[in-house]
Image (tube, coloured by chain):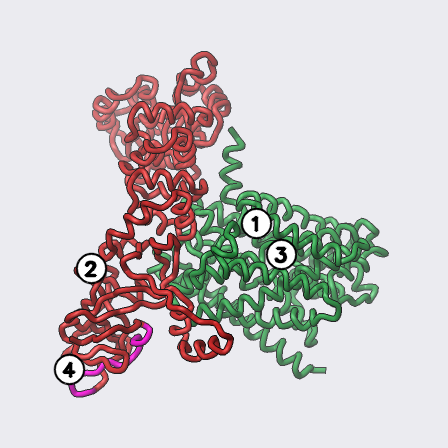
Chain colours: A red, B green
């Protein structure tokens, strides 16, 4: 039983680790933890000597306290170990990071970590989030205490049991307990939003991930628009759709409307039909831009295929597409950037052996997704087009606006009935 | 609709321009005015390398904010531990406390030009700052700040009203010159020091992280940062020009920005005085809004204390106390007769100068760490320029200190 009682990580970090002969193997750099029965337990200690790191498994450790740390392996027989991102290292991944104290409903920072010996294991039982932890790390807990005693201030321990800790990094989720997650779900949505707004967006998204759909929807509704947007950006589409369904249609529309078109479209496609229609109706108010009226059903081919090959593909692809969208064929590179365009007429008239790059028109008229419908209509009319590609600032082909879509929007009676086609 | 695109632009644009402009605070305006009055156009050229360094450093910090979504004190704490963070926050507090005093002093002085007593304006200023910060939202705060940035154009107008000899201005701007004169060198150091400050690195990174600018929109942010930095130094340029064209030939020496405003009257007319004075008031108030607020945020962020302007003293005691104490103590120091105002400001600029190389070195190490930045680490040229700036600041600071302690003549 190497560890009796308890100790703080800061009391052993950078202290020497000895081998059976009493020679220094190196200094303690970190401890690696794995999921235990209740609390996470130390699986190995990481020792550092002259920039080299070694991992010593817990069962090779003799004594582990703040005065002596010794192992029953000789320094010569240790094999260097390269730290990986997969490892859960207490000092690297928990210390100094922000975590959620589910009991106090607060975001706190880990100032120190408390370890406790139980049977043959060393468990991570609590984190220190108080002033004491900071003073201990600074190396003057004692002096600080004396000074404060003079000032008649008593410095209490501010430890939070691992029972109440909800980590904010995905890699720590495997050592997280269930209780804090449940406690967090009980909190008021406004408190949850407050927690989320105090951590980085990535950590916030991770936190949302741990909530059930209903709680997540309530919490997101309370967030600032910028944060809302960030929460949805990397979320799994099915889950995002569930959350959107859970929201009021107007909140949902605000959120959906602020997302990038692609993300919004993907999420809405998963949302229940009736719900999605409500949202779309609301979105309609802001949909008078090229991005709002475009369709992403269009034909696009790489520049190096032959006219013959192009026609072969056309016969398959065009079947699914409306006739007005099937007149032009866009030539795109591997990253979907537009290189040129050609038409069904030009392809039919060209020699079958030529490649598209040779026959395409490179001076393609385009509009940005933000262009308003009037600009789009004027451009289409001016260049006598049947459809116009919508292209972003980096010339990615996002979709096309067809002539009939524009006409629909320009004729008021019909435009009113038309919903934004996400 | 067209406004939608503009709205996207506005929603991303902001932090860079605001940061860069608050940079021209009371201390900055004082430095530029004094430099222009004392040495004419001779120091203008330093604005060019300063601008380059400013753009590079701000861009680097902005990138960190966008990529990591975290503030600078957050990253320093997570990667370098408690000790470094505590000392750095302590330094930041001291330096920024001095800066806040300087802001309120500038605010008070600018109103004295118009004959309004500081015993009225300083409490009013504190109240305005307090209300705006505790009652306003981030968005409204940003709008007001952006609006206030426009007032800086008053300096450009003053610059033209001073009717400088433009060919001479341009010649001295592009031809660097140095004088072996301790005060000249001190002012050179001060121009860099007042343009590139520790707190603005923290402010810019946090406000970008909080805004949640997406990596895809980073190009807009880049424009924001570059335009902001250029704008700052263009304003600085016109301040120096205005003072250099009028006060320098007449041999009028000034020690304070509001003296410049008053001294301008016989040369450039009453309007120039009004413009100069109002711009100074505006700049000081902007600084007074941001500096104490930002400081409390970073300290609490780094230490892991509850923070936020909508919190009560009970919920976020450290945050509210640090913020309130900075505001209240600054106001008191400005109002109390014979307070050690000059000593505090010198102390503040010394701490700022000492802090800056450390902040930049930490920022540089963080931005070059692929574990943190992924593929967005610094291009090599950026590292060279930043290291160059750090070295220049250290050398200049040493020269400045030595020449103050043991003047050359």
Kind of element beneath mark 2? loop
Q: Distance between the residues labelled 4 and 3?
A: 61 Å
Q: How far apart are marks 3 and 2 (CA)?
A: 51 Å
For the residues carrying marks 1 and 4, which lies nearer the camera in this image?
A: 1
B294 part of magenta stretch: no
**Pick the front one: B54 or B283:** B283
Q: Do labels 1 and 4 share a chain?
A: no
**Pick the front one: B57 or B258:** B258
Q: Earlier in the sequence, mark 4 or mark 2?
A: 2
Kind of element beneath mark 3? helix
Image location (x, y in percent) of residue A378: 50, 21
For the residues carrying marks 3 and 2, which lies nearer the camera in this image?
A: 2
Identify residue for label 1.
B134
Q: Is residue B47 left or right of residue A91?
A: right
Identify residue for label 3.
B287
Identify residue for label 4.
A74
Residue drawn 52% across and 72% down?
A: B391
Residue A342 in sight in this render = no
Identify residue for label 2.
A38
């Amino acid at each position: 039983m190497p560890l009796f009682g308890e100790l703080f990580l800061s009391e052993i970090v950078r202290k020497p680790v000895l081998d059976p002969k009493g020679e220094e193997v190196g200094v303690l750099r970190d401890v690696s933890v794995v999921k235990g029965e209740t609390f996470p337990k130390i699986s190995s200690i990481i020792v550092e000597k002259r920039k080299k790191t070694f991992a010593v498994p817990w069962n090779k450790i003799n004594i582990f306290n703040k005065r002596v740390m010794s192992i029953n392996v000789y320094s010569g027989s240790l094999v260097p170990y390269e730290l990986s991102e997969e490892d859960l290292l207490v000092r690297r991944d928990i210390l100094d990071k922000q975590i959620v104290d589910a009991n106090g409903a607060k975001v706190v920072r880990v100032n120190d970590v408390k370890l406790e010996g139980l049977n043959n294991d060393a468990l991570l039982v609590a984190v220190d989030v108080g002033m004491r932890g900071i003073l201990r790390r600074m190396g003057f807990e004692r002096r600080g205490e004396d000074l404060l005693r003079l000032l008649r201030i008593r410095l209490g321990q501010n430890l939070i049991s691992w029972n109440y800790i909800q980590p904010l990094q995905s890699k720590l989720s495997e050592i997280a307990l269930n209780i804090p997650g449940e406690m967090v779900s009980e909190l008021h949505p406004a408190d949850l939003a407050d927690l989320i707004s105090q951590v980085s967006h990535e950590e916030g998204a991770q936190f949302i991930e741990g909530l059930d759909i209903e709680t997540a929807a309530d919490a997101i509704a309370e967030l600032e628009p910028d944060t809302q947007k960030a929460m949805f950006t990397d979320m799994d589409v099915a889950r995002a759709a569930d959350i959107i369904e859970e929201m009021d249609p107007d909140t949902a529309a605000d959120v959906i409307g602020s997302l990038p078109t692609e993300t919004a479209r993907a999420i809405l496609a998963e949302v229940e039909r009736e719900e999605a229609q409500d949202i779309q109706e609301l979105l309609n108010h802001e949909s008078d831009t090229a991005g709002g009226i475009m369709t992403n059903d269009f034909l696009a081919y790489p520049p190096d295929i032959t006219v013959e090959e192009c026609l072969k593909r056309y016969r398959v692809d065009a079947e699914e597409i409306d006739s007005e969208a099937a007149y032009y064929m866009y030539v795109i590179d591997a990253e979907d950037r537009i290189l040129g365009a050609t038409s069904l007429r030009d392809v039919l008239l060209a020699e079958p052996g030529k490649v598209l790059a040779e026959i395409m028109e490179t001076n393609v008229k385009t509009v940005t997704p933000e262009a308003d419908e009037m600009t789009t209509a004027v451009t289409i009319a001016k260049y006598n087009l049947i459809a116009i590609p919508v292209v972003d600032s980096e010339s990615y082909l996002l979709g096309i606006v067809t002539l009939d879509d524009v006409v629909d929007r320009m004729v008021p009676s019909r435009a009113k009935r038309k919903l934004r086609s996400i | 609709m067209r406004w939608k695109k503009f709205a996207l632009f506005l929603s991303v644009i902001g932090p860079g321009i605001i940061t860069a402009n608050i940079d021209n605070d009371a201390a900055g305006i004082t430095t530029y005015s004094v430099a222009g009055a004392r040495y004419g156009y001779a120091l203008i050229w330093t604005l060019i390398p300063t601008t380059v360094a400013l753009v590079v450093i701000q861009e680097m910090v902005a990138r960190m904010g966008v990529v990591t979504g975290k503030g600078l004190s957050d990253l320093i704490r997570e990667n370098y531990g408690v000790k470094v963070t505590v000392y750095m926050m302590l330094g930041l507090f001291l330096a920024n406390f001095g800066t806040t005093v300087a802001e309120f002093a500038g605010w008070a002085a600018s109103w004295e030009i118009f004959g309004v007593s500081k015993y009225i304006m300083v409490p009013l200023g504190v109240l305005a700052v307090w209300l705006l910060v505790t009652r306003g939202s981030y968005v409204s705060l940003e709008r007001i700040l952006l609006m206030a940035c426009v007032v800086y154009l008053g300096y450009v107008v003053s610059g033209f009203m001073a009717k400088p000899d433009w060919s001479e201005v341009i010649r001295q701007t592009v031809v660097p010159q140095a004088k072996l004169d301790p005060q000249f060198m001190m002012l050179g150091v001060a121009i860099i020091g007042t343009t590139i400050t520790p707190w603005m690195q923290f402010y810019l990174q946090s406000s970008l992280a909080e805004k949640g600018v997406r990596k895809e929109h980073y190009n807009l942010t880049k424009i924001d940062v570059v335009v902001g930095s250029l704008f700052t130094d263009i304003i600085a340029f016109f301040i120096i020009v205005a003072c250099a064209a009028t006060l320098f030939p007449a041999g009028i020496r000034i020690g304070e920005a509001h003296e410049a405003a008053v001294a301008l009257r016989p040369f450039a007319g009453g309007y120039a005085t009004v413009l100069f004075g109002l711009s100074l008031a505006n700049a000081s108030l902007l600084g007074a809004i941001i500096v104490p607020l930002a400081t409390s945020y970073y300290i609490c962020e780094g230490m892991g204390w509850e923070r936020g302007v909508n919190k009560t003293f009970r919920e976020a005691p450290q945050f509210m106390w640090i913020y309130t104490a900075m505001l209240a103590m600054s106001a008191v120091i400005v109002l109390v007769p014979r307070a050690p105002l000059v000593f505090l400001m010198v102390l503040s600029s010394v701490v700022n100068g000492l802090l800056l190389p450390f902040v930049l070195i930490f920022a540089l190490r963080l931005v070059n760490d692929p574990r943190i930045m992924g593929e967005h680490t610094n291009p090599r040229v950026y590292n060279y320029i930043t290291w160059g700036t750090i070295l220049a600041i250290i050398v200049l600071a040493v020269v400045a200190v030595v020449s103050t302690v043991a003047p050359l003549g």
